[in-house]
């Protein structure tokens, strides 16, 4: 089940998001200090340790915006996303984990109403997903999808549809899911699948304090035993997040908490492998501190 959740996050997170009618984006840095490697064969905590440091950026720029059908947006936008991570690995007898990961993609998004409470969201992107050891054509992954979204209420939307990817060597279609449920009062919450959930209280117009749980990860194409494989890093974090509103368009966030889970997994680039259960658990790390800082903007 963890594998399926990871692939949902990997392929669907670039699609997830409400329609932005202006330029939006963020720059974020997060840090996980050294924690112990838990050997999968017997679940023993070892003396081997790894940390994780990452910087991320995202930008979405509307290319065309028309208000149609009861003032609903018909939007074309360009989005760019990138992340770079560095890891230090200490006291290992052999190389198990990468020291660098890079994900970068560019894509287009189209959102339009299709009648009543329904709308359609379509995306197409191309990206490089690499461990930086050797960048080849195998590191280039394509993603595309079409989701049909029903807005049950102004603050509640659910959608589904096909998502196409070549991550498993040949193009294949996966099921895509969209969920966004949020409130806007002083006491507010948000649930977004597969990104996570938050609940917060707005103490002042320019200050929110939130409790958050988030699913996050990175991926890379690697060569192992002479074969092209997918390496996935995934983490679930929980923490406290103060958010400061800077004027009308800027937001600054700090997050402090812990990693609930942090692990790697390696899979063959075969369609059958996404459904196959492994005989051994994934390599993972003990729980430790998590910290992050992010600057966001919406115009």
Image: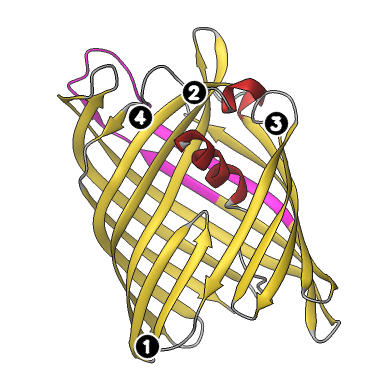
| Residue at numbered disc 4 | 99
Quarter assignment of residue 52: top left
Residue 270, visible in the rendered structure: no
| Residue at numbered disc 1 | 206
User: Label 3: how many residues lie within 10 Å, few (<14), some (14-19) or many (20+)?
Assistant: some
**Between marks 3 and 4, how big is the CA–CA gap?**
25 Å
User: Label 1: how many residues lie within 10 Å, few (<14), some (14-19) or many (20+)?
Assistant: few
Mark 2 or mark 1: name the one nearer the start of the chain.
Answer: 1
Q: Nearer the viewer, mark 3 or mark 4?
A: 3
The residue shown at (61%, 64%) is 17
| Residue at numbered disc 2 | 277
Mark 2 or mark 4: name the one nearer the start of the chain.
Answer: 4
Q: Is residue 190 left or right of residue 173?
A: left
**Would you place residue 241 above or below residue 292 in this image?**
below
SS at circle 1: loop
**Between marks 2 and 1, how big is the CA–CA gap?**
47 Å
The residue shown at (40%, 51%) is 55
Q: Are marks 2 and 4 in contact (CB under 8 Å)?
A: no
Q: Nearer the viewer, mark 2 or mark 1?
A: 2
| Residue at numbered disc 3 | 166
Q: Is residue 212 left or right of residue 176?
A: left
Region of the chain picked out in magenta, as a range:
82-108
Q: Is residue 194 magenta?
A: no
SS at circle 2: loop
**Would you place residue 26 above or below residue 218 in this image?**
below
Residue 136, visible in the rendered structure: yes
């Amino acid at each position: 089940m963890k594998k399926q959740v990871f692939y949902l996050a990997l392929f669907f997170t670039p699609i997830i998001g409400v329609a932005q009618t202006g330029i939006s984006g963020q720059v974020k840095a997060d840090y996980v200090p050294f924690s112990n490697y838990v050997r999968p064969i017997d679940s023993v905590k070892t003396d081997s340790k790894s940390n994780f440091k990452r910087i991320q950026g995202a930008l979405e720029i509307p290319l065309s915006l028309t208000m149609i059908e009861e003032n609903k947006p018909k939007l074309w936008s360009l989005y760019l996303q990138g992340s770079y991570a560095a890891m230090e690995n200490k006291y290992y007898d052999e190389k198990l984990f990468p020291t660098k990961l890079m994900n970068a993609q560019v894509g287009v998004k189209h959102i339009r109403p299709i009648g009543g409470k329904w709308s359609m969201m379509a995306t197409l992107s191309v990206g490089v997903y690499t461990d930086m050891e050797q960048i080849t054509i195998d590191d280039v992954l394509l993603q595309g999808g079409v989701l049909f979204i029903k807005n049950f209420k102004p603050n509640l939307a659910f959608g589904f549809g096909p998502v196409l990817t070549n991550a498993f060597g040949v193009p294949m279609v996966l099921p895509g899911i969209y969920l966004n449920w949020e409130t806007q009062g002083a006491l507010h919450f948000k649930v977004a699948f597969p990104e996570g959930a938050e609940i917060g209280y707005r103490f002042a117009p320019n200050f929110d304090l939130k409790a958050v749980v988030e699913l996050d990860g990175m991926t890379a194409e690697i060569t192992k035993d002479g074969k092209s494989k997918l390496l996935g890093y995934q983490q679930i974090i929980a923490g406290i997040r103060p958010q400061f509103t800077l004027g009308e368009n800027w937001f600054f966030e700090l997050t402090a908490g812990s990693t609930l889970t942090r692990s790697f997994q390696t899979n063959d680039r075969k369609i059958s492998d996404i459904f196959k259960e492994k005989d051994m658990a994934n390599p993972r790390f003990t729980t430790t501190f998590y910290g992050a800082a992010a600057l966001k903007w919406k115009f």
